[in-house]
Amino acid sequence: MNKSDLHITLKRASWVLALFFSVAIVVSSVGRRGASQVVEIRVDIEPLRDGNRLIQEEDVRITIQRAFGARLEGLPLSAIDVGRIERVLEDDPFVLDADVYVDARSNINVKLKQREPVLRIIDKNGLSYYLDREANRIPLSRHFAARVLTATGHIPPHDPEFMERKRHRLKDLFLLAEKILEDDFYKPLIEQIYVSNTGEFTLVPNVGNQKILFGSFANADEKLENLRIFYQEGMPYEGWQKYRTINVKYKGQVVCERR
C-alpha cells in the first residue's frame, strides 16, 4: 500500500470513528434523558379576551394526576407520554388546544388555550351552560362567570348534535345569537334573548325598558335591518322610554306599542 492509499484509508477510518462516537454520545444522551426524572409541571394558560380564566393551574394538575393515577413529578421521563397528556387535556370542556413538551431541564411544560364562551344558556329545566363560537358546550366555571349574551325560556336540553339538525330550536337560537354578536351595532345593545313555548324570540336591550318581539328565526337578516333603521332613525326622535314593545315579526314592518 502506497502512502496515498494509506492516507485515504486513515482518513476514512477517522470519519467512521467520528461517526461512531457521535452516535454513541447521542444514544448516551438520550439514555440519560430517559432515565432522568420529571422535575416539575409548568402550566401556562392563555387568558380569555377579558383577561379571565375558566380553568386554573391547579385544575390542570389535578386532571393530569387523575388520568395517570399519580403525580408525574419524580417519574422517569421515559414513562411520560406527552401525546397522551395533550389528549387528556383536550378532552376537558374548557380547553380548546393543548401543547405539551419536555424541556432540557426535565420540566413538563403545558400550554393551554381556553374555549371562549359567547352565549350563556339557561334551558327550560333550569340547567345552565355556555356555548362557544363553534357551538360547543362549556360548563359553568367555579372561578368566574363570563359576562356574555344570555338566553332563557323554553330552550330544550342540550343535544351535542343540535347544529347538524335540519330544524332545532337551540340551533335557531345560536344562529340568531351569532348574528347579534357579529354585528357592532347589536352586540353592545342586546343583553338577553327569551324563547317562547312556540319558539319565537324576544330580544331584551340593555338600554331602555322596551322588549323587541322578533318572532321566529325566519327572515332574521331583514328583521335585524328593519330594527336597525328604526333605532337609528326613529328612536332618537321618540326617545328610548316611549315604547313598551317593538315588533319586527311582520315582513317589512316595525310595529310599536306605546306606554
Image (cartoon, helix red, strand yellow):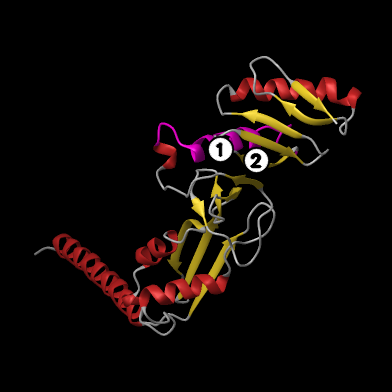
1 vs 13, left or right, is: left
Q: Nearer the viewer, residue 137 or 21?
A: 137
Give the residue type at disc 1: Leu
Q: Which residue is drawn at the image coordinates 12% and 63% (left, top)?
A: 2
Q: Position of residue 76 (x, y in %)?
A: 35, 81
Q: Which residue is drawn at the image coordinates 54% and 47% (left, top)?
A: 132
103 vs 189, left or right, is: left
Q: Nearer the viewer, residue 249 or 220?
A: 249
Give the residue type at disc 2: Ile
Identify residue for label 2: 193
Q: Where is residue 33, by image quadrant? A: bottom left
Element at badge 2? strand
Q: Is residue 228 visible?
A: yes
Q: Which residue is drawn at the image coordinates 38% and 73% (left, top)?
A: 67
Packing grade of label 2 (10 A; few <14, some 14-19, many >=20) is: many
Element at badge 1? helix
6 vs 135, left or right, is: left
Packing grade of label 1 (10 A; few <14, some 14-19, many >=20) is: many
Residue 195 lies, with reference to residue 94, above or below; the image says above
Residue 237 lies, with reference to residue 21, above or below; the image says above
Magenta-span inclusion, residue 119 = no
User: In the rendered structure, which disc, 2 or 1, sits on the residue that comes first in sequence?
Assistant: 1
Mark 2–mark 1 CB contact (< 8 Å) = yes
Q: Is residue 29 visible?
A: no
Image quarter of the C terminus:
top right
214 vs 163, left or right, is: right
Q: Which residues are magenta?
A: 165-188
Residue 70 lies, with reference to residue 186, above or below; the image says below
Q: Position of residue 24 (x, y in %)?
A: 26, 74
Identify residue for label 1: 173
